Amino acid sequence: MEYEYWREAIINAFNILNLMDEMDINKSTAYDVEHKGKHYPPKEVFRLAADFIEENYPKIVIPKPSGGKSTNKFIEKFGFKVIEKEKIKMIEKIKTLIETPHFQDLLASETFYFSELSKLFNQYKDFDIELIKTDLESYLNNEPKDFNFQELLDSSTGDFNSFLFLIGKLISLFDEKGYKKKAWNPYQDKRVVSRSMLSQKYWTGNLLKYKLLDFRDDYLQEEAAEAFKHSINFINQPEQHVNIVSKNHRKDIVNYFNLGSASEIINLFSNELKDLKSELNRGVIISHLLYNSELKKIWMSSIVGLMASDSTGWFENYLKESNKHNYSIVWNSKKPSGTNATLKVLRSVITEEGSFNLYYTSNNKINYVAKIIDFAENNQDYINKNWKKSHKNIFGFNNSFSEYNDGNKKASIVFLCESFNKIKPINKNDFEIFKTYSYPTQDNLTPLQSEPEIDIIKTMSKINYIDKNENQMEENYNAPLNQIFYGPPGTGKTYNTILEAAKIITQDETITYTDSQITFNEHLGKQIEFITFHQNYSYEDFIQGLRPDTESNGELSFFKSDGVFKKIADRALKNFKESNTEVQKKKSFTEVFEDFVFPLIEGDIDEIEIKMKKVSFYITNIKDKSIEFRKMSGGTDHTLRIGTLREMYEEESTKDIQGLSSYYRPLLTELLKIGKLEETERIIKKNYVIIIDEINRANISRVFGELITLIEKDKRYGGNIPLTATLPSGEPFIVPSNLYIIGTMNTADKSIALLDIALRRRFEFKAMYPKYEIENKTIYKSEFLKSLNGLIVKSGKGHDFTIGHAYFMCDDNETFDFESTINNKVIPLLLEYYMNDDQEVKKILDEALKEQGLKVDNWPLEVIRNG
């Protein structure tokens, strides 16, 4: 009976905890007891259960557990499950993920997620072996060391060419690194079975051999490379396998979930997948869940790569030179932390997956990565490898191990790289360090347990073939062309414009706020513009107007000045039109102009002669914004604007300048002669963003003018019915489809209902109201804030006049001061909301502050202690 009494006591403990306030419960750090989908701290459960036993069954001896584990074991004796909190977090995260559209679509789909791959694989298996057998044998017997898939295609003919083309399309669906994946992978999202990033040579050789051996299972299970085996098993029987091809990852999953073998992975998350329509998608969903960026950090425990710290600045030259070769060498003066054990794991990674990544960090950012396919630890090891024979055209290769030194330090380990790439910057903290090792300093190499997805910045390819689409920016983040973030003060509207702009520029939906700030600052004034509207903001400020010339030698004159919107629209349009074309490189205007006028500024010459068709004019002086010149006839009161000349240099056109074009044109020609370089570059289409803070504070009709129609999606350059407006200056103007407009709107100033209807129809609106909980962020006094906002809404002001959560947050290195926040931020805002009705403000705040033991009094109003 004692067993039943304890079960009764523990269930009673659950009921008591259900009634208690969360704040009064002492939460556990490592484990929870699970009961009917809820979780409870084991020590609290035991304490309450023991009280129940003592009161109702005093004869039963109550044990005294020595710690957390003994408490857990005691509770488990009575049929209750104790789970690690980390696993609870994973389960909760999985439940959340399952509800997202991606997983709901997978659950509801009756079509296999990789149906196109399945069709191609069946064509591969059905291809008549007799038509290609001789070519297959010839290739496998004489497999080239310097492999190039395009050259293999070009050199093959007939049926073998058709078969190789089929294999190429298969690989584009098997591997993230598949050749011509953009062109050959039929899926819009370019999905692949494996993110193992194995070489085209690896997949080609394995697929050819598997075909030649008539798909023999003994070859697949005993001889084939690990990643290939798991990929083929998956596509042959997707209902029985998951598309996780790494042996180390499978081992980690088995260990973390306490499975008997890797074959049991397919049975994970059965409760969450109970609504699955097609068993063919079970393995896909499981792998997508496990490889979620947050979840994989929990179960992954193997070494996946290395991180080095290096700020000596050799990367750019090395990148340029290494890309002219098939392979390259990098070395380090220290071996990785964990030495032999680490190197043993890394060798197995190379054996099973073909390579691992070596990341280089500088100033806490990862900007470069080397793909390592082999390494040597000493001279004898280096000699035995004989890389020069097995891998042709290696950049940085030396004949002996000892030759790898820089005069101060010598190599302790030498790496053979298949590629060396620059990547979009990633915080080093996004990588998880293996075990208890530290992030690298100086010459240390640190083993990594997990690595985020990287975005390689494309350079000149080693492969001769260049897909025409390679020079188009990948559209991975779909944002509205025109959007407005609206809500009351302090809800993160401006904060989120920076994040949104960075997502649009980088096409990275997962970019962190820290990285978005870096992106924002790097592109401000180039691909990003930030302005704030106010009551006096005008069309002339925004689009184009006339400005007085302050350097016109006493004469009243005006010049045409483009506004901030027109400037960024022109930059975006130029990029859009030139994208995917080869253009001649040129130096920056500032560099060219300074070199050109340097002798005059330094006093080496008195004037610079600029030759025209028949005569010349002479530059006599350079001011901050203008160039003074004299004509051949002797007149000296003449100026050219440096800003206008800059625009002409960028556009390589004298535009529509009345009267002075005959002087600008020869000067522009001289500058272009100096600035133009011999090499060309292919222009990549970019996105541009203009952020308009407080968009509702200006007179919208006056500021936007005819632009209000041009910003519509279909009216833009690149849209279905592009429209060009003629500005008052006579200049044509059109808005391109790669320019995004983001506005912010404070609803305490003006509600959406009062906003210009023409603007409302052309923008998407995203509500931003107070939050009381943000993942990985602290909102102080969130319950007070919720209570205060409830009182404001109840008073009749509505949600547009609530107080934002940003006022109740602070930086990690700051201490939150509640009373100062109320006195200096909340009270002034409420007085503004309530038209300086201090009694109404006092009434609302006194009610909200009651639980804090505070009230509002005095004048000016301030927080004081009760009593």
Image (tube, rainbow, N blue to C red):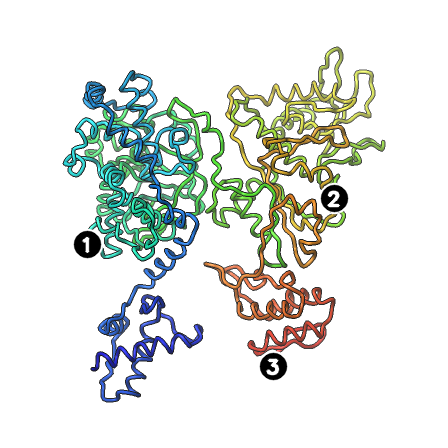
Residue 125 image point, x, y percent: 24, 29
Q: How far apart are marks 1 and 3 (CA)?
A: 63 Å
Q: Residue at x 67, y 53 (%)?
A: 752
Q: Quadrant of residue 334?
A: top left
Compare marks 1 and 3 and give the one earlier in the sequence: 1
- Mark 3 residue crowding within 10 angstroms, few (<14) / some (14–19) / many (20+): few
Compare marks 3 and 2 and give the one earlier in the sequence: 2
What number is the disc on residue 701? 2
- Residue type at mark 2: give it: Ser
**In the rendered view, does 327 fall on the left or right side of 471?**
left
Assess whether mark 2 and mark 3 are in contact (beta carbons under 8 angstroms).
no
Residue bearing the label numbered 1 = 260
Residue bearing the label numbered 3 = 866
Assess whether mark 3 and mark 1 are in contact (beta carbons under 8 angstroms).
no
What number is the disc on residue 215? none
Q: Residue at x 25, y 76 (%)?
A: 66
SS assignment at label 2: helix
Q: Distance between the residues labelled 1 and 2?
A: 69 Å
SS assignment at label 3: loop
- Residue type at mark 1: give it: Gly
Residue 443 image point, x, y percent: 34, 44
Query: Which part of the image, by quadrant, shows the N terminus?
Result: bottom left
